[in-house]
Image: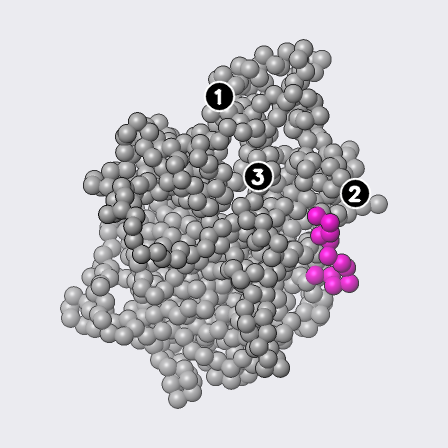
Amino acid sequence: MSESISPVSVPSAASAVARPLFAVIIGINKYKAGPRHGVPSLRGAVRDAQSVKQYLEEYLDVPSHQIALLIDQDATRSAIITAIASLANNPLIAPGNPILIYYAGHGTQITAPEKWECGSPDRKIQAIVPYDCTPSGYDVAPIPDRSINGLLYAVSEKKGNNITVVLDCCHSASGTRGARNIDETVLTTKPTPRSIRLPDHTYRDDFDQEIWGITPESVRGSSTIAKFANHGLGSHILLAASLPAELAYEASVNSPDGKEVTRGRFSVALLNLLHAEPPSRLRYCDILHRLEHIANQNPQCEGLYKDRTLFNLEVPPVTLSKAFPIRYESATGMGPGQHIIEAGSIHNVSHESEFTVYYESDQQRLNPIGMLSVKAVKPFSSVGHPVGGKCPVNPFEPPISMPVAIHTKYEAQENLRVWIEPTDGFRTIFDGLKREYPELLQSISLASDQSLSDIELRFTEKQEVSMKISAVQQLLPNKNSFDWTVDNVKQDPEFLANILFQASIFYSELRRPENNPRITASVDVEFYELEQDIEAFISSGRPDEPLENYRPLTPILNKKNLWKDGVVNINVRNTAPGDNIPYGLKLTNNSSLDLFVNVFFFENNSLKISPCIQSGSSGPYKYDIQLKRKQEIINERHEKVLAPGTLAIGYGAAGYNPISFQIVNTARKTEVDFIKIYLTTDPVDLSHLEQPSPFNFSGSTRAMRPWMASPYVSWSHIIIPVIEHPED
């Protein structure tokens, strides 16, 4: 097997980076401690770092003075921290300018200090190893993910979150490794891992408090607190060479002049892709799907803004019709070939579903190449049969572009019930909308009784459209009623059809039954108000510094779990959005299944659906497990015990923002919203669920053979109603 570096010359690639780029590039081959003390030398890290620098200078026209290069003895712990921290005060960097931080060298995995919330039952955290790191860690410690996140937060607060971090080292995922115009072929020599082992006591909980003491160790939310917008996974995009508990390798390669050199596998693959595609044509979420295969490694892409194009703040617009990848599986001796659609029951696919197929390059969806009707539904995928006998994907011809499928026909069901008084003139308009927009409104019907409706429509005395929207009562204790009214709705047919369509999606997602209730029964939910970790703040050594930023958050332990009897009740301050109370969630997995987590916030007063956590898709690679299964560990008494996996949202090491709430309509006393937690056995892309408020836009908006056990796949969900009371 071979890998080659074959950059393709693409004109004006530099113009794809809309703003000047700044970089900190680190490469360490030789370490101060050396092999005698358990820190073996590497051979390719420096060459990788130099190749990244060369790519920036020659391909993206980045001036050399905008690149800080730290090689071997220059890459000390203090130098690395200083180089990253200094980006925040660099007067040449304007807010929004792209920043690249690249590291090639050893990575390590150590036990987290006792007070740290890290989620994994074995309490392991990841760290990069600076040049002067001592094996004991007491003199010069490695730099753990929490400290890196603290540095990135400080930079993002002043320069924005257009930050890309690339780590080509072992244990690099959650650790928040270039090429010239040559061909290099990987030899069959044994690859070398970029990893060292350090003692468990290497890192104490009081290290680096001057860094993470100024940042919350948290990130993400429904209504994310303004001061937390750039924390954790919100401050940067991370491209990592491997899973947290996995090794990343460098290997020998031959250059055309016959010289044998060593390169990091991940760096070679990434730079190959970057040479082939200019940044303007590549989104972060596409990288793992487009990256050439790397044996025995599972690269990761993490961050809240993976839909952005590289080194850019640009995000493709949210659309109402999600395009799902499809592929053709060739016929075997036991049956014909079949079309596999990467959408299953969790995507609301049923046996009555139909998909229209387009080439991905047909952005306007004007030229369909075929249709597929669903004949088999699995949790995360389905099998489609060509309608009319026309095969939309010909396995014997190279496609013009990647084929994608748009869900155009759903199961015949009532997702939304609308009430219109029989004598109200809006009935005529509603009938006209149903005829003009049959695909959008196919699951919407007139309610037989006003009490059974989700939405009421009527004309006011001024002949203006008024819309009354009700919360999903079956999810609320005692079937409480929460209604709100939108007056003066624009009388545009397409606008009205889009409102009803998005309302049907909103109600459908909240009402849909789960696939496997046993998963939900095995996951405990805790919902806490959070407070600043004052102890960490005081011990940071800067108690007199102005409170420009929040300190690390931690649950208020003397307050009980707010998730009780299937609902959360909270008091909401009538303050500016940035000053609201922060809240966090904790999920505890008592099952024997590793679980992936997607969390969405359903805003009842606007029909908006926002992502809080997305597991996403890792292409052909394994995805980092967010909520690990219960597993056997050795406790401090050296006893074997079963420990559940946990995931903290809003605090801890996972990097998700705290959430907050604000009563929008001050004339009302109480409001309700919903947090829906999707639990899946595989990583699933649920980005199609995201939708803006329909009231904030105008116009178009989205065989016999030996039996083999298959991996168990399933999904479930938890819905948390949040009733918001005004604070006295």
Magenta part of the chain: 555-566
Q: Residue furthest right?
A: 728
Read off the residue under disc 2.
726
**Gap in angstroms between the C-alphas marked 3 and 1:** 24 Å
Q: Pointer 3: residues within 10 angstroms few (<14), some, or many (20+)? A: few
Which residue is denoted by mark 3 in the rendering?
512
Is residue 513 found left or right of 537 in the rendered image?
Answer: left
Q: Residues within 10 Å of mark 1 (few under 14, many from 20)?
A: some
Q: Helix or strand or loop: what does disc 2 sit on?
A: strand
Q: Amino acid at mark 3?
A: Arg
Residue drawn at 48 percent across, 80 percent down: 198
- Check disc 1 and report the residue beneath it: 437
Alpha carbon distance from label 1 to label 2:
40 Å
Q: Nearer the viewer, residue 123 or 573?
A: 123
- Please report contact status of discs 3 and 1: CB closer than 8 Å, yes or no: no
Instruction: State how far apart marks 2 and 3 are (Cα).
Output: 31 Å
Q: Residue at x 34, y 63 (%)?
A: 266
At 46% from the left and 66% from the top, the residue drawn is 244
Residue 496: percent from left, percent from top:
56, 22
Q: Give the residue type that dot 1 points to.
A: Tyr
Dot 3: what SS?
A: loop
> Sequence order check: which comes first, mark 1 or mark 2?
1
The reply to whether discs 1 and 2 touch (Cβ–Cβ < 8 Å) is no
